[in-house]
Amino acid sequence: MLDLKLVRQNPQAIADQLSKRNFQFDVAAFEALDQARKQADIDSQNLLAERKQASKKIGELVKSGVAIDEAKATVNATLEKIETQLGELTAKAKTAQDELDNLMLGVPNIPHADVPEGASEEDNLEIARWGEPRSFDFEVRDHVDVGENLGGLDFDVAAKLTGSRFSVMRGDIARMHRALIQFMLNTHIGQHGYTEVYVPYMVNKDSLRGTGQLPKFEEDLFKLQGDQEYYLIPTAEVPVTNLLRDTIVDAADLEQGLRFTCHTPCFRSEAGSYGRDTRGMIRQHQFEKVELVQLVKPSESDAALETLTGHAEAILQALELPYRKVLLCGGDIGFSAQKTYDLEVWLPAQNQYREISSCSNFGDFQARRMLARWRNPETGKPEYLHTLNGSALAVGRTLVAILENYQQGDGSVVVPEALRAFMQCDVIKAG
């Protein structure tokens, strides 16, 4: 959520900055609701002053010789009228505040100054490329054909069990999927200084509201039946970032680093993706990710984004998968993010780079919604943390990239060197 004080100072300036996202901030609606709330507060303060004066009047009447019962009777009618008006104003102020909160919960984050102009992913800015796409001397097969030929991927059985956009893995393919998770976690814990956490795969509304999925993107979520109003997590970002909801962190804890890594399944309805990537594992309702989350001082978040993105890149480099790094434009950046890098891995069967990681700095946008703060030792006062997260990596898409980039002419798949200790083999062969 944006800082209301900042918005009140110059709502039109906020609207101008949000226009980079192609988002139209309703300045008139904001000012009307804010004024209604403010006026209700002013009127309430005036009535409280009147009530105080009316209460004093009883004593003044008694001093002038009026009997106390008569004095109370004279003033009570006025007090009752004031109490009724106060109740109405309190309800009016609450309604105005609720409407203002609902308006602001639907307003995205202000893009960082570095974010380029643009309407869609076509306008994203390429920052760098790593690795050279391999040249094949045979017809390249996509991951579906490679995996099915190896007997390790089965989408028909998954459709029978559940429906479309699910997969069943067997044998060495399932083993490689598990090996990737272990490799990613071990790298981030052992080399990048993250603490592994295990979290629930179901969360409540407060958690989803804190990271920005609710209320705007409920249709993208799987909501469970029952009285609890639980949702399946769309990403580990939600429970892991919310570990610090309603928390004030000591500065000493930040010096040691609040870096968390977590492996979870993720569940998404893909409501806006009808007809896109229907073949294979690129876009599924259930998939695995290893997530990175950092919570830092505001002065450190820009540098932390570069570091976190580098940690995701390190996985791709260790697996020797060609990729490119792009800076998302205003029209493509996520709702809660102020700046995002996407890492896109080369998929030879598609002859293009596809997203495998998204690394974002959210500034204080999520922390403000969650009340996640740190105590500044210079002022002694709590201040909002900055939150960051990124996939490092999306496990299924990493498996896709390996199957396609490491495939051989005889249908086998070479195991990347970084995974051989986990796999205990060099090549996956059919049968």
Image (tube, rainbow, N blue to C red):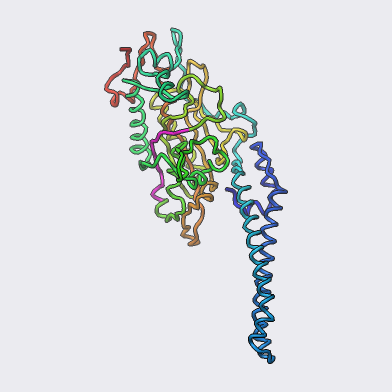
Quadrant location of the C terminus in the rendered image: top left
Viewer can see residue 348: yes
Q: How many numbered discs sit on the rendered protein?
A: 0
Relative height, residue 147 to residue 375 (above, below): above
* Residue most extreme to the right: 28
**Residue 78 within the magenta-colored segment of the rendering:** no
Question: Residue at left 45%, top 38%?
Answer: 233
* Residue most extreme to the bottom: 65
* Residue most extreme to the left: 424
- What percent of the width, then of the height, locates residue 418? 34, 25
- What percent of the width, then of the height, locates residue 386? 50, 47
Residue 115's image quarter?
top right
Pick the residue in front: 400 or 37. Answer: 37
Pick the residue in front: 79 or 4. Answer: 79
Question: Residue at left 64%, top 32%?
Answer: 118
Residue 218's image quarter?
top right
- What percent of the width, then of the height, locates residue 420? 30, 23
Pick the residue in front: 202 or 294. Answer: 202
Main SS of the magenta part reads: strand
Magenta part of the protein: which range? 255-267
Q: Using residue 257 as the reference point, say whether residue 71 is left or right of it.
A: right
Viewer can see residue 401: no
**Residue 264 within the magenta-colored segment of the rendering:** yes
- What percent of the width, then of the height, locates residue 299? 51, 49
Question: Residue at left 45%, top 47%?
Answer: 242
